[in-house]
Image (spheres, rainbow, N blue to C red):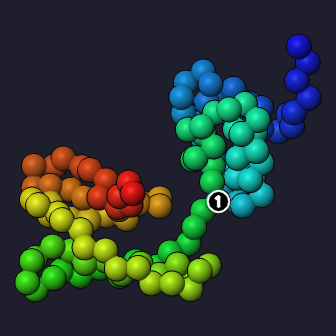
């Protein structure tokens, strides 16, 4: 079978199929192209990873009553604020990641605390 797809992105797709990991372009056009290729090849994990980057502003603090972290997340594309309370248990630090926030415990373990699956 002959597959007529963009040869620019085929090495990235092939690397993902072989190893389960691959790099993603930072620029919007490249991510959109990888997104389309992942849709074409039905590679759901790669498709999700290549979704457009959403810019957000996250303001965090601690609730004085519960000692949990409170996050205010602003989405400039939608011009909306969202408030989230994050139960952190024994987490000592919260670190921003690429589209998420990770928590580090006093024992050194790491887990993703935001976004939560809804």
Q: Quadrant of residue 6?
A: top right
From the viewer's side, name the closer residue of 111 and 24: 111
Element type at mark 1: loop
Quarter of the N terminus within the rendering: top right
**77 lies left or right of 8:** left
Q: In the displayed orientation, state which residue is furthest to the front.
A: 118
Q: Residues within 10 Å of mark 1 (few under 14, many from 20)?
A: some
Residue at 18% across / 80% down in the picture?
62
Q: Is residue 96 above or below residue 1?
A: below
Residue at 77% across / 58% down in the picture?
29
Rendering coords of residue 31 (x, y %): 70, 52
Which residue has dot 1 on it?
52
Rendering coords of residue 63 (x, y %): 15, 82
Residue 27, visible in the rendered structure: yes
Q: Quadrant of residue 72?
A: bottom left
Rendering coords of residue 22 (x, y %): 59, 36
Rendering coords of residue 81 (x, y %): 45, 84
């Amino acid at each position: 079978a002959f597959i007529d797809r963009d040869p620019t992105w085929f090495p990235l797709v092939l690397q993902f199929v072989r190893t389960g990991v691959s790099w993603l372009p930072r620029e919007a056009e490249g991510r959109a192209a990888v997104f389309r290729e992942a849709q074409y090849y039905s590679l759901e994990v790669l498709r999700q990873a290549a979704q457009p980057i959403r810019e957000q502003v996250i303001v965090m603090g601690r609730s004085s009553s519960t000692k949990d972290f409170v996050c205010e997340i602003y989405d400039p594309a939608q011009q909306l604020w969202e408030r989230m309370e994050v139960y952190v248990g024994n987490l000592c630090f919260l670190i921003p990641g690429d589209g998420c926030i990770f928590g580090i415990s006093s024992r050194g373990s790491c887990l993703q605390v935001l976004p939560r699956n809804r």
